Structures are given as C-alpha cells and as structure tokens.
Amino acid sequence: MAGLYVHIPFCKKRCRYCDFFSTTRLERQEVYVAALVKEIAARKDEAGEPIRTIYFGGGTPSTLAPQDITRILDAVGIDEAEEITMELNPGDASPAYMQALRDIGINRLSIGIQSFQDDLLTLIGRRHNAQQAINAVRMAQEAGFTNLSIDLMYALPTQTMAAWQADIETALSLGVQHISSYGLIYEQGTALTQAVESGELEAIDEETENAMYDELCSRLKQAGFVHYEVSNFALPGYEAKHNSRYWDHTPYIGVGAGAHTYIPPVRSWNKDDLEAYIQGDGIRESETLTETDLYNERIMLGLRTNRGIVGPISVHSRKQMDEYIHKGLLRRTDDDRIVATQEGIHILNRIIEDLMI
Ligand code: SF4
C-alpha cells in the first residue's frame, strides 16, 4: 500500500521562523490545482501499489476551497482510503469549512496551533490567535472529526516554562488524539533568526529547551499518549498512518512543486519552482539509495521511533552503540531492539551520526 503527499505551497502570510517553500501569491492557486490534477493522473500508479493514505501538506492547504480539494481527490480516484489528512491553519477555520472538509472525505486534520499564547503567536508571526486555535479544534469536533492532530512549538524566544506547561494543559483539555511538537529551529535568513542575530531577541538556552521537551514527554505519557516518534505523540491507535511511511521506509508518491517521492530504492523530487511546475516543467531529480544509504537510514529512522534499531548491525555501529548504552543514552529492550533513552534523545543527531557507516 502506498501513500500520496500533495504539496500546497500557498500561505496567506509568511511566518517569521519559516523557510519552507511557499508563496503568498494565492491568485496562482487555480492553475496550480490544474497542474496537480495532471501530475496525479500521470503518476498515481507509479508505486505499483494502491494508494491508501493521502496527506495535504504545505504551505497552507486550508487556503484551498473545498471544490479545489475535491478536484484533487477526484483525480486520485480512490474509493478506499485509510487516512486523508489535511493541514489546517486555525485562521481558516469556520463551521461551514470544517463541515465541507468532512463531507468531501477528509478524515484527519493536522491543525497548526503552535502556541496558545497570543504574545508568542504574534512574535513568531502566525496569523491566528489563541482563541481561534481553540475554536478551530471545537469546530472540527462539532463537524464530526474524531482524529485530530495539533502542532505545538517550544523553545520560542521569551517563552517561559510556565507558559509551556499551560500550553500542554490546554492541548490536553481539548481532547485531541495526536500531538506533534517541535523545538524552534533558527533557519538561516528568516526574520526570527535575524532578530536573534541582531540582539533584538534572545534564544532560549539548551538546558531550558531540553527541560521543556522532557516536560512534554512526561506529561503526555501521563495522559496516555504513546511517544512513537521523537516529535510525535498519539493516543493508542491514532499514530499518523501516512507520516509513518516516512519512518517505515514504505513507498509514497509526492505531487506538487517541491514534493518528494520514495519508491525503494529511488528517491526523487519535483523542483521547488511554482511557475515551472504550473508550466508542466516536470523535470524531476532523483537518487538511487545505495546499500550504505539504506543501512544509515535504518539506523536513523529506527532511533527516531519507538521501534528502535532492529536487524543486523555493523561492527562500527555496534562498538558505538555499546558505548552509548554504557553511558545510559541508548538502551536494549527485552526483545533486543536498541532505542534511545530520554537523555539520549537530547543528543540524538550526534548519536545517529556516530552509529552511521
Ligand atoms: S503557515 Fe506554515 S508554511 Fe506558511 S509561512 Fe507559516 S510555517 Fe511556513
């Protein structure tokens, strides 16, 4: 079974921390959707397996009208989808829009809340406020959505531990099934990075960032969430099916400007150039993963998830692994998988790098 990722690179306003590929030229949406429909028709069978999950990501997919989403879904033409997720900005929510999304077959929403603190939302340049975020979840629930994910960010400049704890509690009080949470990354050239570089804002220190992450993990665990990937938490049975493909290494087709595809062992991607894409300039680049690449991906993806590393390990990796186990940063489970400890997750990238060949 394969997945389909649909990239919608439109945003009404750019956030101050973002370096994703997106544009505010919403007037290009109609022709973009027409190009998407063409690409889907040409490529939907490429994986050689039926598509069972669809993910609308962005950008901001909720800038699209329900009719546009319907055109895309009709082009895919599947009658049996396990999961159809759409990312939604709380600023786009209304009871009628939520109902329309349900009616056309979207069965999971990923709501980009980021924070329930108005001062922090303004600081990072989001276009919604805390009340709109809460309302968006309630509207989705009233429209009948029973599989909701929200995004939360931590380690934001000026964010206190008390404000972060309050955000976690608000998230839990909303009754959502899934939470994705990311520490702020200062991408080169973004407005927020420049503000920190110029001294206008101060970045949160590493110790506080780690403490915020630990607080998140322990509170969500206490509330019954499974920590199944470094940044993802789900009530049992609500793990993201589509996103799990990225971590399981199962095939997915990506359509739209800048979208990535993985059909083992080949990874390919569309150019992130909106106008070229609309003109049908479908030149895709690709790379074939070598045995070494696949091994290293197994190490990386294994340690990022609660499944851990399974299967044969090289002499080099084993030596490194034993040292990290000795330091309490990795541990061996009863069924012989290697997983990162809570302390190990703080320096996970370094551990992964050391274990790779
Ligand atoms: S809405 Fe998302 S993609 Fe658009 S600018 Fe903000 S963070 Fe980036």
Image: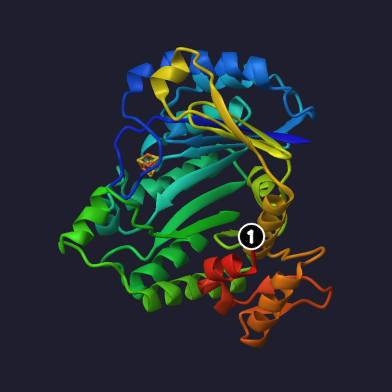
Q: Does residue 242 appear left or right of residue 219 in this picture?
A: right
Say which residue appears at 44% left-offset and 47% top-offset. 112
Say which residue appears at 40% left-offset and 54% top-offset. 114
Q: Badge 1: how crowded within 10 Å, few (<14), some, or many (20+)?
A: many
Residue 204 in picture, x, y percent from top left: 31, 70
Mark 1 close to ligand 1, CB under 8 Å: no
Of residues 322 and 314, the one drawn nearer to the viewer in this rendering: 314
Of residues 276 and 107, the one drawn nearer to the viewer in this rendering: 276
Say which residue appears at 65% left-offset and 59% top-offset. 235
Q: Does residue 123 appear left or right of residue 165 in this picture?
A: left
Q: Residue furthest right?
A: 335
Q: According to the image, label 1 marks what residue?
A: 300
- Answer whether residue 123 is visible to the viewer in this image: no
Q: Does residue 15 appear left or right of residue 303 in this picture?
A: left
Q: Quadrant of the N terminus?
A: top right
The image quarter in which residue 23 lies = top left
Figure check: 240 above or below 346: above
Residue 57 in picture, x, y percent from top left: 51, 36
Say which residue appears at 79% left-offset and 27% top-offset. 48
Figure check: 7 above or below 355: above
